[in-house]
Image: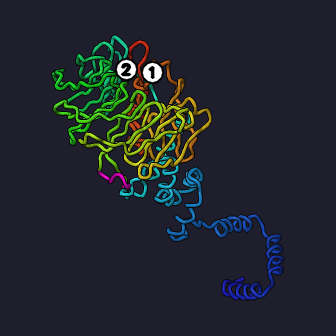
Amino acid sequence: MEKKDFEAWLDNISVTFLSLTELQKNETLDNLISLSGAVQLRHLSNNLEILLKRDFLKLLPLELSFYLLKWLDPQTLLTCCLVSKQWNKVISACTEVWQTACKNLGWQIDDSVQNPLHWKKVYLKAILRMKQLRDHEAFETSSLIGHSARVYALYYKDGLLCTGSDDLSAKLWDVSTGQCIYGIQTHTCATVKFDEQKLVTGSFDNTVACWEWSSGTKIQHFRGHTGAVFSVDYNDELDVLVSGSADFTVKVWALSTGMCLNTLTGHTEWVTKVVLQKCKVKSLMHSPGDYILLSADKYEIKIWPIGREINCKCLKTLSVSEDRSISLQPRLHFDGKYIVCSSALGLYQWDFASYNILRVIKPADFANLSLLGFGDIFALLFDNKYLYIMDLRTEKLISRWPLPEYRKSKRGSSFLAGEMSWLNGLDGQNDMGLVFATSMPDHSIHLVLWKEHG
């Protein structure tokens, strides 16, 4: 058939075909397929694949594609990235999807990062770290050796760990290298706190002392307690040092002169923890920016305004049982907004603005767990055998790490948490350095450290 005649015939057939019913169209196609040979069937197969398989992700506007992708879980999205280069490009650029996935894993989000491909990479890094936590492979251990007697006091700050011992010395260690930077002669240390220039120690000899790191010189001595000093805190801006003692009192001192400014009474047990912290919320009793003093004993947490008034009044006393039947464990978290403490009944969180209990967290077998650190996303806990990480959004334990038989202490000074910014959410940079430290019966310090990313 000539081309001209064929084109006219095809036009007539097409017009007739379009006038048929759907059933008649199907019967016509069936008849034509039955008359076709291998060449025609192959041609039909190749064209049907193109006609039927539409790449909707490529055809849709980008905004609609992103909207559809938000309904898929991250693992499915990663699988979809393997479909084609175009799919991988579109899915990887869906910032909101990957940011949400990171948040769900407990990751901090920096909205200032504009690179559209950044957050998929962050998610891949995050899921690896969370898998390591679930599989108990996120940490590694190390030891510090140098003391010749019981190590009781520990304090950590910015990659440096201070240890105070019954061998009448205090040492400052670089955790990353395990090297001792300073070692000075002191009294027996029950508690320590330091900065770049000085070390403050509370002692079993009932005194507090301030030492210069560079020379080892005692630059101030604070005398007045009649029992061992178990906790100290200080603030250079206020020129104030506070101390909690086995004599049931809290003393407020002038840091520069050593003069006792105030003695706070009301505790009926050893004061094992004092915290000096700037308030971040407003209430009838305090405003943001005010400095607040917290002191804790076996049964109660007392809240004080920090000032030089002789007759300083306690603002509030917190406890978990009115009849003092339930004791508090000797760890206390206060960030200016919330107070957190653990007991046999669970982990208690108070709102600092109202002093009301916000929640009590009690997972299975909580009775033996002690608080180490508390953040917006995670909490760090431990017992006689393991170090635990809890996801505070679900109140479930998501990871654990075995601990050796450490030297137990009723007052809790022989163990501490290391870096704690990651408790407010991991970010790929803050999961490094010290996680936990405890003193051992052989006078060494056992360290649990973040393992580097795989």
Image quadrant where one finds the N terminus: bottom right
| Residue 448: x %, y % from top left | 43, 27
Which residue range is magenta in the image? 282-289
Please state the horizontal and vertical placement of residue 291, each as a whole percent of the image. Answer: 30, 45
> In the image, is residue 53 above or below residue 393?
below
Q: Is residue 366 visible in the rendered structure shown here? A: yes
Element marked by disc 1 = loop
**Residue appearing at x 70%, y 87% in the figure:** 11
Quickly name the residue at label 1: 409
Residue labelled with disc 2: 152
Q: Say what amino acid the circle numbered 1 marks.
A: Ser
- Disc 2 vs disc 1: Cβ atoms closer than 8 Å? yes
Q: Which secondary structure, mark 2? A: strand
Question: Quarter of the image holding residue 9?
Answer: bottom right
Q: N-terminal of the two: label 2 or label 1?
A: 2
Residue 301 is drawn in which quadrant? top left
Please provide percent x and percent y for residue 385: 54, 24
Instruction: Please tell me how crowded label 1 is: few (under 14), some (14-19), or many (20+) other residues with Cα within 10 Å.
Output: few
Determine whether, in the image, residue 49 is placed left or right of residue 413.
right
- The residue sitting at the front extreme is 311
Is the magenta region chiefly helix, strand or loop?
A: loop
